[in-house]
Image (cartoon, rainbow, N blue to C red):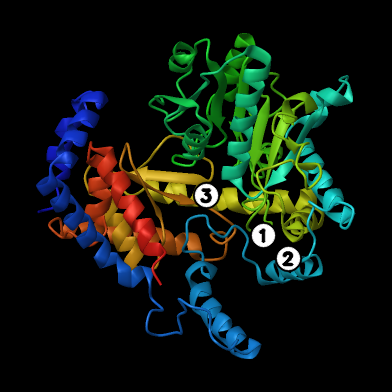
Amino acid sequence: MALPDPKSLRLLNHVPPRLLSAAERYLKAVPMVRDLLSKETDSLLSELEDDLKPYRGKMPAFDHLPVTGRSREEVLRELQALESQEESRWREGKVSGAVYNGDSDHIGFLNRVYGLHSQSNPLHADLWPSATKFEAEVVAMTASMLGADAANAGKPPAEHICGSMSSGGTESIMLAIKTYRDWARARKGITKPEMVAPASAHPAFDKAAHYFGIKMVRVPVGPDYRADVAATKKAINRNTIVLIGSAPGFPHGVIDPIAELSELARKKKIGFHTDACLGGFVLPFARKLNYEVPPFDFRLAGVTSMSVDTHKFGYAAKGSSVVLYRGTELRSHQYFTATDWPGGIYFSPTFSGSRPGALIAVAWATLVTMGEQGYLDATRRILETAAAIKQGIRAIPELHVLGDPLFVIAFGSETVDVFKVMERMGERGWSLNGLHKPAAVHLCVTLRHAQPGVAEQFLEDLRAAVEHVKAHPGEKGTMAPVYGMAASVPFRGLVSDMLKKYMDLLYKV
């Protein structure tokens, strides 16, 4: 079975989704078709297995506990070897996002903080009151950065901006959506909740909808890749519990019209969530540096919750984020309590029971050592680097930048296969993100890219990659066809099946 031609598959994109879904179910019910699809998927993934399992046969592997424990020195040597081999992949600044600071002294400091608090757990507040101190202060500092001072002015404490920490942006988003579901059920009697989000909003919102029984209503983005306010308004009904906007969105790096969307939510008396996981620790400082940043935070009366990641541009260690709410009454719907358990009363503010207090301590230590000036300096370097990269991309005739981004730069092409360009960049050591609808590639600029010479090297390699693809139009590559198929195939269940098998592959020893 040959890989489907993306051009022929695009013709099916004009067929109504319900008909496509029914056709897909019918085709997959035919044994021969099902077997052919499975064989093709397995063939594609087998080509990736060596790349995904580079240590197989080169280092010890364990699918059972060793009979006798290995020596700590031996294990540490192996871990050091793995770290040394992988560090170069991000240290040089050739990765989109992923590592947002990466300075050796900064990492060493965070590791020392983690070591000091490695045993702490805020579930046991009586044993580690330091963990609750750190969490409360991280939440307060983050809220203040995102407009809490103006929002709280003249309001009673119960209406102040508040929140909690989580394990990352996905958990922050899921906590917020779970909170709106329970709030709407308690306050409005809504039992079939819906949320409205632009097509560009993060899949974490779909995950929340999937887990919590909420209908996701996706609306299109405009030609500027920002959420369509008119389409959002049209999608609202009596079951709508929350609207979504991003600041900025992950795919194209543009900021949705948060002011208009949140005002629409306020008038409809429903929630509005600003997803600032990427921009929360950049946009406030960009504004202070006189970059044009539209309003997006709690200074807007309609914004009732936000998510912002301390482990991205907050420069804390991986595994920490903040979710914020307008008032403790709304936040209370996030909490879980059990009052009749034989083991005693039980409560937890987030999904986890036990939580790593060390990561909370690391986030606190990062914020207080960076300070406002540290974030201003970091943001200045990132935005100056991003400006140079945008200018360089726009100077390449075959490429164009999507929308008007600040630091997450998506680019596409009308004349060359941008996924082939991405693959050529991969051969030069760059790890970039492929986008769909439209086909594009993006680079999330971090402090790694602000190192001397990195932006210049990126643009040099990008020009060379484009020229190579132009000179070799028939060259298929290995990953470019996969991206092309995933971008164009109308049967989304096929893509989902492939992704599930990909995850199965990750768990193979």
Contact (CB < 8 A) between labels 2 and 3? no
Question: Is residue 453 toward the left or the right of residue 379 in the image?
Answer: left
Pick the front one: 231 or 454: 231
Bin the neighbour count of mark 3 within 10 Å (Cα to Cα): few under 14, some 14-19, many 20 and up.
Answer: many
Q: Residue at x 65, y 49 (%)?
A: 379
The residue that label 3 is drawn on is 386
Q: Nearer the viewer, residue 133 or 376?
A: 133
Question: Relative to 71, is 137 on the left or the right?
Answer: right
First in sequence, mark 2 or 1: give its number: 2
C-alpha separation, residue under disc 1 versus residue under disc 3: 23 Å
Looking at the image, which residue is at 45% across and 21% down? 228
Amino acid type, mark 1 = Ala
The disc labelled 3 sits on which kind of residue? Answer: Ala
> Outermost residue, front direction?
342
The quarter in which the C terminus is drawn is bottom left
Could you tell me how far apart the alpha carbons at marks 2 and 1 are, in whole angstroms? 7 Å
Mark 3 or mark 2, which is nearer the start of the sequence? 2
**Which of pointers 2 and 3 indicates the residue nearer the eye?**
2
Per the image, label 3 sits on a secondary structure element best described as helix
**Whether residue 308 is situated above or below residue 184 in the rendered picture:** below
272 or 499: which is nearer to us? 499
Residue at screen point 55% across, 18% down: 191
Which is closer to the viewer, label 1 or label 3? 1
Determine which residue is flagged by label 1: 317
Is 97 left or right of 171, judged from the image as shown? left
Are the residues flagged by discs 2 and 1 in contact, CB closer than 8 Å? yes
Mark 1 or 3 closer to N-term? 1
**Residue 6: x percent and y percent?**
17, 43
Q: Which residue is mark 2?
A: 110
The image shows residue 356 at horizontal and vertical percentages of: 72, 58
Q: Percent position (x, y) of residue 490?
A: 23, 36
Mark 2: which secondary structure? helix
